[in-house]
Amino acid sequence: MSSAPAPREIWRDARWLAQAVDPHAGLIRLVEMNAEDYREASFLDDRMFEQPRTSHVLKWAEVAEAMPAHARTDARWIFHIGHVGSTLLARLLGELEGVLSIREPRAFRDLLFFPAEVRAQYIPTIQALFSRTFAPGQSALVKTTSAVSEIAGELLADGQAALLVYTKPRSFISGILAGENSLAELAAMSDMRRLRLASRGVQLPESRGDADAAAAAWACEMTALEAAAGGRNVLWADFDSVLGDLDGWVQKMARHFDFAASEQDVRAIANGPLTRCYSKATEHEYSADLRGRLLSEAEERHRSDIDSALAMLAAAAETAPLLRKALDRAQAES
């Protein structure tokens, strides 16, 4: 096991992932990583410790004070509403030469549990920590968990580019209803999402079942993205549209992030093995066709409930401008 790095060493490159932070205790957990570790890991939250890792806990203040005066803050970002293929997009873009793809580190979620004035003391250093790479010409691409969209506007430094990934509400609800794991997560996050919606002036009636709860989840995460997007350098991506033209969208996303991408590279990535496996567990086969079949089957089984849930969203949008904007965006892509 390696010894704990000196604070100045942490800033040399991306070797020491800022995996977790504890503002209450003033601590940061660092995990030793190489380029292949980043490439393989679907999650950089505590699930990464299912296999042996070298990690150390240091005082936050020491790390922050060692930050170079001209530290990079040019990370690119992917925010999303959950269950919309964001891991696949982060993996695909990570295949481009010169891109370090960093997927779902815990540190951002840790900040959610603290007031904005506390987060403000941490975010400038966090922005720099997640802009580190293994080479000067490399760029960092950070994909967060869906709940972190709540503070996306705080995390984006001036001029940083972000990709905002979503699906239309009908597709999202069908996808949730198609998976047992999704339903468990839905129940666990329901109360918190209701509070988040209320903070943006969105009031929904009590849920009548899973379709309503999924609709509320869509409304919560989409309005979070809408609130963060205003005036910033963002590209919206409907995942179902992306799947319909993967070559074109890989090129479009690369241009948005200012990543070098030849037509040959894009074609190889968009038609490569990552598109035929489940991106969070690449040992399992998965494809756009399978996704389409699962969504169609779920919609067929739950059509009435889905229609009622969509009507609920439309009614709530009459008095909630951000929700109205989200629904208009989804309809514009139809």
Image: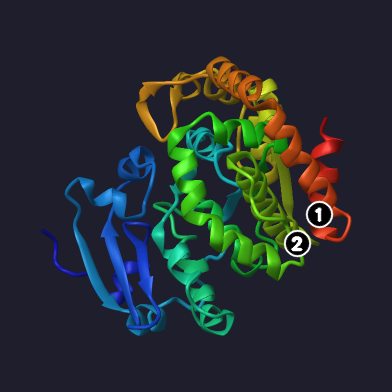
Question: At numbered mark 2, what does the secondary structure look like: helix, strand or loop?
Answer: loop
Residue 140 visible at all: no
The amino acid beneath tag 1 is: Ala
Badge 2: residue crowd in 10 Å (few <14, some 14–19, many ≥20): many
Question: Quick one: which residue is furthest to the left in this view?
Answer: 1
Residue 268 visible at all: yes
Identified at 79% across, 39% down, the residue is 330
The percent position of residue 220, horizontal first and vertical second, equals 66, 55
Badge 1: residue crowd in 10 Å (few <14, some 14–19, many ≥20): some
Question: Quick one: which residue is furthest to the right in this view?
Answer: 318
Identified at 54% across, 37% down, the residue is 93
Question: At numbered mark 1, what does the secondary structure look like: helix, strand or loop?
Answer: helix
The numbered mark at residue 316 is: 1
| Mark 1 touches mark 2? (CB < 8 Å) | yes
Identified at 58% across, 53% down, the residue is 77
The amino acid beneath tag 2 is: Val
Picture quadrant where residue 42 is located? top left
Q: Which residue is mark 2?
A: 202
